[in-house]
Image (cartoon, grey):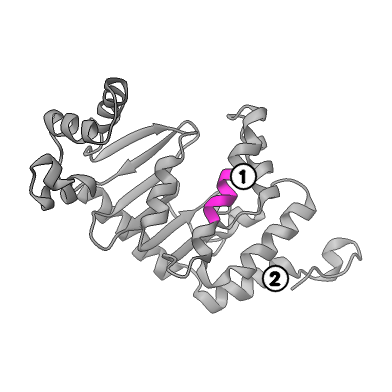
């Protein structure tokens, strides 16, 4: 590609990896060489305009950027104060959660659930990212769907316990939740998901504050062994709590 364009190979690499911003002339030449037409160029230019912004806002349903960021991350750290992290949700929990929100048209929910579950494949890769999911215990106490949905969700969390750190119910954390993706040769990205929009942040100051949050959570959260023991209590509560139905699968 570099030879055909008359560029230095490093220029092609830096543009493709987002290490350097391409000029409009560069984009025209590159995309023309790829066989793209003017309509493709105009659409790409519109999206590329914000590619180097330190704060990027996208509509909530646009999850392509999230999937790409997850799939290329070396480490992934998240804090979830109000629900189970998407990468360790069961399909039934995800479906019930979307329906509780009221922000998503019902006909779109099955596709959103399918996409969320497909994203979980990165946790089964041989080169999967190193993950730490900080989950506030109050999120586990919120009933999403019926008892069976919650039982299955607790069991899945216990199965994924090596990645879970529980924050005790009596600990106050002044954060609405976020994710930090770190990369081997790229800038770290912080991500916040709201009801209406998704926000991606590369601002160094914001990244530093996000790391401080996770440093604090590391201090106040249960360790891996304690978290697993606590999750086991949710999976197998005392028999009397369930009207004689017996303990759940541990």
Residue at horizontal 25%, vertical 33%? Answer: 48
Query: Is 155 drawn above or below residue 177 in the view shown?
Result: below
Circle 2 SS class: helix
Q: Residues within 10 Å of mark 2 (few under 14, many from 20)?
A: some
Q: Residue furthest front?
A: 4
Foreground: disc 1 or disc 2: 1
Q: How far from the left and from the top, in percent, is residue 74?
A: 35, 63
151 relative to 123 in the view: left or right: right
Please state the extent of the stretch shown in magenta in the rendering: 115-120
Q: Residue furthest bottom?
A: 225
61 relative to 95 in the view: left or right: left
Residue closest to the eye, 22 or 160: 22
Q: How far from the left and from the top, in percent, is residue 72?
A: 37, 56
Name the residue carrying label 2.
233
Residue at horizontal 15%, vertical 37%? Answer: 22
Query: Which of the numbered marks, if any, corresponds to residue 114?
Result: 1
The answer, for residue 143, to whether it is visible in the render is: no
Circle 1 SS class: helix
Q: Quadrant of residue 136?
A: bottom right
- The number of discs equals 2
Chief secondary structure of the magenta portion: helix
**The C terminus is located in which quarter?**
bottom right
Residue closest to the eye, 159 or 230: 159
**Which numbered disc, 1 or 2, marks the residue that appears first in the sequence?**
1
Residue at horizontal 64%, vertical 69%? Answer: 158
């Amino acid at each position: 590609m570099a030879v055909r364009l008359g560029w230095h190979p490093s220029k092609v690499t830096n543009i493709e990896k987002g290490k350097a911003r391409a000029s409009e002339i560069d984009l025209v030449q590159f995309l023309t060489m790829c066989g793209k037409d003017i309509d493709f160029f105009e659409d790409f230019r519109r999206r590329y305009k914000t590619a180097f912004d330190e704060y990027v806002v996208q509509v909530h349903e646009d999850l392509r950027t999230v999937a790409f960021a997850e799939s290329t991350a070396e480490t992934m750290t998240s804090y979830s104060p109000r629900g189970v992290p998407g990468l360790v949700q069961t399909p039934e929990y995800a479906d019930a959660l979307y329906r509780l929100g009221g922000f998503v048209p019902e006909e779109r929910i099955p596709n959103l659930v399918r996409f969320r579950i497909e994203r979980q494949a990165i946790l089964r890769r041989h080169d999967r990212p190193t993950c730490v999911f900080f989950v506030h215990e109050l999120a586990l106490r919120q009933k999403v769907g019926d008892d069976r949905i919650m039982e299955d969700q607790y069991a899945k969390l216990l199965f994924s316990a090596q990645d879970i750190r529980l924050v005790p119910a009596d600990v106050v954390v002044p954060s609405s939740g976020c994710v930090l993706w770190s990369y081997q040769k790229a800038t770290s990205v912080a991500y916040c998901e709201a009801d209406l929009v998704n926000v991606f942040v590369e601002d160094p100051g914001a990244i530093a504050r996000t790391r401080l949050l996770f440093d604090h959570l590391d201090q106040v959260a249960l360790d891996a062994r304690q978290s697993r023991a606590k999750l086991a209590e949710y999976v197998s509560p005392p028999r009397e709590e369930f009207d004689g139905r017996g303990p759940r699968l541990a």
